[in-house]
Amino acid sequence: MKKSPCKKGAQNIQIYTTIDTSVKSQRDAFLKGLSTGPKNPSGKGKRLIVVHIGSADGFVEGGLLCFESKKNTADYHDEMNGDTFYEWFCGILPRLKENSIIVMDNASYHSVKKDPVPTVAWKKEDIINWLKSKDIVFDKPMVKFRLLDKVNEIKPLHTKYVIDEEALKTNRHVLRLPPYHAELNPIELAWSVVKNHVKQNNTTFKLNDVKKLLIEGVQKVTSDMWANFVSHTIKEEDKLYEIDFITENMLDNEESHSHIMTITGDTSSDFSDE
């Protein structure tokens, strides 16, 4: 696991973390700690889509994006897509300190590539043209999968994300969390406070009132609380980092033991031949 810069050793660097989620059907809202309707609502549940960003100083003022979904689809990503996130992200950059790091997960709309990289779905001619645009020269014809091997060799040099490039223009930097590690994002803890506030105070079950309570919940999360959330996240990170070393040592020991057994086996065989 690559260690993130959450440690205090990164002097003068502000760490911001993002969250994007939704509140939709009655059942989903109940599971998330938010409710959008009575116990037996008629019709499909409405949905709020929420995006926010914060740091050890608290939620960023003006950073909350909260809007009602216009579609009744099963997945809120239909509306929280690359364009929507990009527009919000560009608007929030001026509100962040310079030389800061913005931590987020690897959702697809966080990771829209500036220059799409060829995949197996691409036509062979398009792959060839992409490689030529990167000054890759062929001395003989190649089948499609050999071309893709060439792509994979140089892909790390040419994988650039749209929002990363926007951040760099303003001297900010994006850091993506490894998959399935929400515990490394302190904003998840801040969001749980917001959810609890809504859950405890929601009596009308109307979406507009849920939105008001959500805003109140955001305001309840103080900078001291945020500092504790960041501290807790660093401890979680340290645990994973320690596990990495333990795993590495176990694998090294197992490999060494395997070599010893092989040598012993060969030696035994030699003696038995005499």
Image (cartoon, helix red, strand yellow):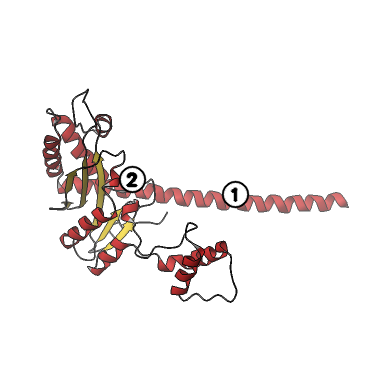
Q: What x and y, as percent, mark residue 83? A: 26, 56
At x 78%, y 53%, the residue is: 267
Residue 4 percent location from the top left of the image: 34, 56
Front position in the image: 261 or 56: 56
Q: Amino acid at mark 1?
A: Glu
Tag 2's secondary structure? helix
Q: Is residue 10 visible?
A: no
Looking at this view, is 268 or 11 the one in front? 11
Q: Residue at x 26, y 57 (%)?
A: 102
Q: Which residue is mark 2?
A: 182
Indicate which disc residue 180 carries: none
Disc 1 packing (10 Å; few <14; some 14–19; many ≥20) = few
Give the mark nearest the N terminus, 1 or 2. 2
- Specify whether residue 272 is in view: yes
For marks 1 and 2, give the CA distance: 31 Å
Which residue occupies 38% across, 51% down? 178
Viewport quadrant of the N terminus:
bottom left
Residue at the location (19% across, 34% down)?
196
Identify the element where label 1 is drawn. helix
